[in-house]
Image (spheres, rainbow, N blue to C red):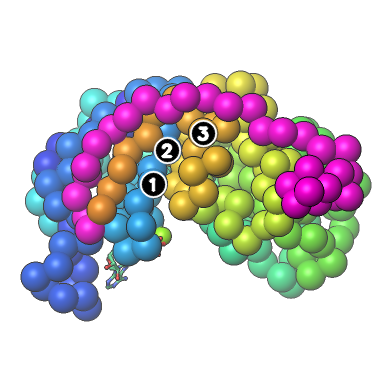
């Protein structure tokens, strides 16, 4: 479970009067797929960065599995971070490394490289045929698959997704939504998904938080919808435009 208790965050280099997040209290249940929506600058990415401890709250508490993160030892905090995966809009892959090396990187950094695990996860996200390619050779959808494989390689309990489809066209967006759904079902991961595309949240999440100017306005249930799958780009264009 992820709990924010009265969390406030102001950036040192930002306007001191302007809080990136104001007194946020929020509970995300274990294994839930939770959405976060809000206009640009409303604090969505800051919320994610607090969960994976790239930022710390100014006041208030972040609890992970009922433990206050600020009270953990450095080693315990590192272990918590190692149970959290993250994917980004711009994929954040290393261009000078092959697909295999990108996926294997977190395990390598943790000193736990397991070739079998890397191959299994590449197979799961359907990029096993791309192992020796470099990121520049891939489409956006393939790059995001690599990033998802990299985030899953160390079997995270929480997967944070910051605008995971915003750099993709509709076809690749649907494929990534489908993959994230499979990830959620197969790995039972708690997922927190930030997106300005409401359709992404509707296809994936059961609840969503609405943020505006650093304030949590509401947490609402989401009515699920299935994405329409088209046979081809031609059929998508025909259906959408005609
Ligand atoms: N490193 C930083 N230094 C200073 N101010 C920052 C920093 N990161 C974010 N901010 C400010 O904090 C506020 C919230 O930013 P955040 O990136 O969390 O918003 P967001 O909802 O993710 O926006 P977007 O949809 O554009 O990604 C904004 O006013 C932003 O300018
Ligand atoms: Mg953001």
Residues marked 2 and 3 touching at CB (< 8 Å) = no
Neighbours of disc 1 within 10 Å: few (<14), some (14-19), many (20+): many
Residue highlighted by disc 2: 35
- Please state the extent of the stretch shown in magenta in the rendering: 213-242
At numbered mark 1, what does the secondary structure look like: helix, strand or loop?
strand
Say which residue appears at 86% left-offset and 44% top-offset.
235
Q: Quadrant of ligand 2?
A: bottom left
| Alpha carbon distance from label 2 to label 3 | 9 Å
| Alpha carbon distance from label 3 to label 1 | 11 Å
Using the image, determine if residue 58 lies above or below residue 24: below
Per the rendering, the mark at residue 202 is 3
Q: Position of residue 156 (x, y in %)?
A: 52, 35
Residue 113 appears anywhere in the view = no
Neighbours of disc 2 within 10 Å: few (<14), some (14-19), many (20+): many
Whether the magenta-drawn stretch holds residue 185 is answered as: no
Q: Give whichever of 56, 172 is nearer the camera.
A: 172
């Amino acid at each position: 479970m992820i709990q924010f208790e009265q969390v406030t965050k102001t950036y040192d280099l930002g306007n001191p009067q302007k809080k990136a997040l104001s007194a946020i209290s929020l509970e995300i249940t274990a294994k839930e797929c939770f959405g976060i929506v809000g206009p640009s600058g409303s604090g969505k990415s800051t919320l994610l960065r607090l969960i994976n401890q790239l930022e710390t709250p100014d006041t208030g508490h972040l609890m992970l599995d009922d433990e206050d993160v600020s009270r953990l030892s450095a080693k315990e905090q590192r272990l918590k971070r190692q149970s959290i995966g993250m994917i980004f809009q711009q994929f954040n892959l290393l261009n000078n490394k092959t697909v295999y090396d990108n996926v294997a990187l977190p395990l390598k950094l943790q000193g736990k490289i397991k070739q079998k695990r890397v191959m299994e996860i590449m197979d799961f996200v359907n990029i096993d045929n791309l192992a020796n390619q470099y990121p520049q050779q891939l489409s956006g959808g393939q790059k995001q698959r690599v990033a998802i494989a990299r985030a899953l390689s160390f079997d995270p309990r929480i997967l944070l997704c910051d605008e995971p489809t915003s750099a993709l066209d509709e076809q690749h967006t649907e494929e990534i939504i489908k993959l994230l759904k499979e990830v959620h079902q197969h790995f039972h991961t708690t997922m927190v998904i930030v997106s300005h595309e409401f359709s992404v949240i509707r296809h994936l999440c059961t609840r969503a938080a609405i943020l505006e100017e650093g304030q949590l306005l509401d947490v609402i249930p989401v009515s699920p919808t299935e994405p329409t799958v088209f046979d081809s780009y031609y059929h998508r264009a025909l259906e959408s435009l005609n």
